[in-house]
Amino acid sequence: INAAMSRMVDSELVAIYDADHHPDPESLLVATAYMRAYGVDCVQGSTYLRITRSPMAYWINAEFFVTHFVYFPALQCTS
């Protein structure tokens, strides 16, 4: 990504989404306002997990929840 961006992007801000994400229409406005207000260079927005009834979807949702709402916050507390 870094190599491609260095040749193709000529702007102050860049947004990257996974191919299966469906961002809210105002997500970039919210993210840029937060970045400017707090003087940060990078933000990760909120994530909405889809409600589906397949075993794989339950596994993916559980893995995401544990990683982002348990592991990452705990890691941040130990730094």
Image (cartoon, rainbow, N blue to C red):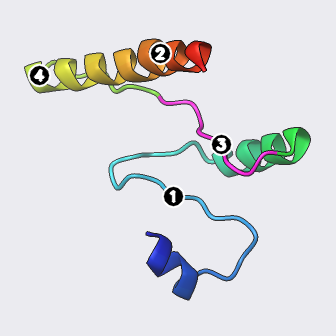
Which mark's residue is nearer the viewer, 4 or 3? 3
Residue drawn where x is 65% and y is 44% of the image? 27
Tag 4 near tag 2, CB within 8 Å: no
Quarter of the image for residue 50 reads top left
Give the mark nearer the N terminus: 2 vs 1: 1
Amino acid identity at mark 4:
Ser
**Image position, residue 60 (x, y; %):** 23, 26
Per the rendering, the mark at residue 54 is 4
Please tell me whether the stretch drawn in magenta is mainly helix, strand or loop: loop
Which numbered disc, 4 or 2, marks the residue that appears first in the sequence?
4
Q: In which quadrant of the rendered image does the N terminus lie?
A: bottom left
Which residues, given as a range, are shown in magenta?
40-47
Reading the image, the residue beneath label 3 is: 43
Left or right, residue 49 beside residue 47:
left
On the image, numbered disc 2 is attached to which residue? 69
Residue type at mark 3 is: Val
**In front of the other: 15 or 52:** 15
Marker disc for residue 57? none
Residue at 58% x, 20% y: name it. 76
Tell me the amino acid under the disc marked 2.
Phe
Which residue is located at x 53 percent, y 76 percent?
A: 5
Q: Secondary structure at mark 4?
A: loop
Instruction: Using the image, determine if residue 12 lies above or below residue 27.
Output: below
- Asked if the residues shown at circle 2 and circle 1 are in contact, with their CB atoms under 8 angstroms apart, the answer is no
Q: Crowdedness of circle 2 by 10 Å Cα count: few (<14), some, many (20+)?
A: few
Q: Amino acid at mark 1?
A: Ile
